[in-house]
Image (spheres, rainbow, N blue to C red):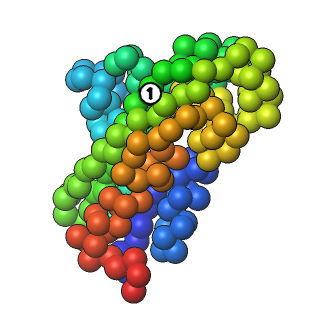
Amino acid sequence: MTPLVLASTSRFRRELLARLGLPFIAVAPCATKPAARRKRRHTASRLASVKARSLIGAHPQALIIGSDQVALLDGQQLGKPGTPERAAAMLRATAGRTLEFHTALSLVNAANGHEQRHTDITRVRMRPLSDAQIQAYLAREPDALLCAGATKSEGLGGALIAGIDSSDPNALIGLPLFALVDMLLAEGVEVLA
């Protein structure tokens, strides 16, 4: 089987990819994030591709998976907060509103340079939140600081959400598995073999 490389050290993405039961290695991408040049809605796709392509030289016979996610509120990109103060500010700004999470996927066949791309758009309706609820959430969900928009949906963050509109629930966590299965099949990798 062609080696499979995940261009990420994110434990969330590793856990998602492991669900497919395929052997893979996770490697930090060798690229820095490029400056924004295009519309924000294309940022995740561009970054997913850059991550995957950055490992071609080190893994010339592999299928390399890159993924990236951005959260948008009214067209403005929200990043990973990094600090409790920034997370609280993000959650106050998004309470009672709808966020768009663009989760992009790139699968690069390093042997021939062929790349497949997909972006899943998930709309998340947030509940109205009080400052006390925001503080309680952040005290109990430290991983929220590592998540776009400070919303860790697979954990306690589910209590922040009023509804989700998505074609793949895995995408919100960080890796669109439904599209990845199709991409792998196109490269001759049968997940259910």
Residue displayed at 35% across by 40% down: 121
| Image quarter of residue 157 | top right
Front in this rendered view, residue 63 or 165: 165
Does residue 173 appear in the picture of this structure? yes
| Image quarter of residue 95 | top right
User: Left or right: 17 with respect to 176?
Assistant: right
Q: How many marks?
A: 1
In the displayed structure, 96 sits above or below 189; it is above
Front in this rendered view, residue 154 or 45: 154
Q: Position of residue 156 (x, y in %)?
A: 70, 40
Q: Position of residue 102 (x, y in %)?
A: 37, 37
Q: Position of residue 107 (x, y in %)?
A: 31, 57
Residue displayed at 61% across by 14% down: 92
Does residue 68 appear in the picture of this structure? no
Q: Quadrant of the N terminus?
A: bottom left
Which residue is tagged 1?
99
Q: Position of residue 158 (x, y in %)?
A: 63, 40
Residue displayed at 54% across by 67% down: 19
Q: Element under label 1?
A: strand
View extreme (bottom): residue = 193
Residue displayed at 54% across by 28% down: 126
In the displayed structure, 19 sits above or below 164; it is below
Q: Quadrant of the C terminus?
A: bottom left
Front in this rendered view, residue 56 or 100: 100
Front in this rendered view, residue 70 or 151: 151
Disc 1 residue type (three-letter): Leu
In the displayed structure, 27 sits above or below 125; it is below
User: Left or right: 80 with respect to 34?
Assistant: right
Are there few (<14), some (14-19), or many (20+) residues within 10 Å of tag 1? many
